[in-house]
Image (cartoon, rainbow, N blue to C red):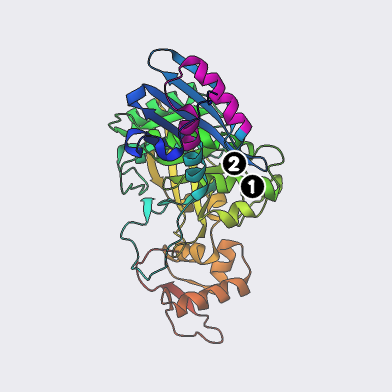
Amino acid sequence: MRMASVEPRIAEVPAASALDMRRDGDEFLFTWSSHGIGIGVSRLRETSAGISAEITVEHTIAGSVHWGGLNLASTSAREALVTKLKRVSGVPPWGALLERVCRTVADEFRKGAPIIALEPAPARETRDLIEKMLPLGETAVFHGDGGSGKSLTMLLLALAAATGTTLPGGLRPTQRVNVLYLDYESTVEEHQERLHALIAGLGVRYEGGIFYRPMVRALTDEAPLLRTEISRLQIGLVIADSLAPACGPEPEGADAVIRTMNTLRSFAPATRSATAHVSKAGADQRAGSTRPFGSVFVQNLARSVWEIRAAEDADDQNALTLGLYHRKANRGRKHPPFGLRFDFTDGLIRLRPHDLAEHTDLLARTSMSYRLQKALASGQATTEELATNLDASVDSVARTLRRLKASGKVIALNGAGGRGHPARWGLAGRGESR
């Protein structure tokens, strides 16, 4: 009686060196050159039913012989695919080969980051990708109302990172990296025109490095493909513009926000930046700080949060003046607020630093201590005079002055003052206002 042939055991498949694997993000390519076979595994997704993927099989003689979905852990699904592949060529040990591919992909996809022993280490010399703006390898959020210049600011940061050029306003990149811009709001034509105007206006030498992708689906749904492209293109900065559509349905919910922020985290070691809107109440707020729209986890899970506001009292229609306010920092102290002015002339976009004190609405969003130091920079004043100038209560001004005095930033020029002789305050030095 003739016995049916059986597939070789896994151990009988040629050594791993003969079956080469290359991984780009969540996409795997296996090549077995001795048999002219290539197997691609992509679109990986794990559910309660196991890990599903799209499998592509190519043969040097037969060409593309298979493309379809596969549950990697399903024995019956793998056997059905082996049966199909045998009809193309019966020479390779398809069963053992496919078993190894599926098991290897599942192990690689699930293993995640290794557990390591936590050891004391000094602070890294380089902590930011762009100084004060983008913490290296972390997620930053920039929030503001519509029309506040968030997208233009993101393109500016992308240009600084891609060229390694220090731009006006102290935007100094610590390294040159490729950038991936994920756009949920605008068009490629608008970004190309803005990029051209920025390059010409700033006199920057641009040799590529900014990659663009229009987005429609939720970021989590696109994550496997994006991780592959981030790896393939060696992306060092990912920009998501903006967070609400990136979250998909119900962007104000905690679940959607946590999934999206975790997806951004999965793009590491690339640095990530996302824009976010504010609520209607936040947009209408005339002073103080606001938070990004939606769940508190937008602010909680970001490592750095900046608020961007456009000046409302600007008198030049060909300019955009912005105030940038550091609302959260997980590494060290928050940076002082600062201003940027974009001038749009003759098809160019020029940029220069701007003093927030020139716009009362921008200055009103800074802290009391910052406003007091700005006021005292122009000369000494009493507590009552400062309160009047800043439209603040005397008690609030007095409390803040005492804190600033204790930290050595202001001094009482005539001691503690006295009846009929109120204390006059001045700056203790020329240090940077905070």
Pick whichever of labels 2 and 1 is earlier in the sequence. Answer: 2
- Secondary structure, mark 2, is helix
Report the quarter where the N terminus lies: top right
> Foreground residue, 308 or 370?
308
Q: Which residue is mark 2?
A: 243
Using the rendered view, name the quadrant where residue 399 is placed. Answer: bottom right
Q: Is residue 4 left or right of residue 414?
A: right
Query: Of all residues shown, which one is farthest toward the top?
Result: 62
Q: Is residue 35 above or below residue 16?
A: above
Query: According to the image, label 1 marks what residue?
Result: 257
Q: Residue at horizontal 42%, vertical 31%? A: 29
Which residue appears farthest toward the front when viewing the image? Answer: 1
Q: For the residue marked with disc 1, what is the amino acid?
A: Val
Contact, mark 2 vs mark 1 (Cβ under 8 Å): yes
Say if the magenta span includes residue 97: yes
**Magenta region: which residues?**
76-101
Label 2 vs label 1: CA separation? Answer: 8 Å
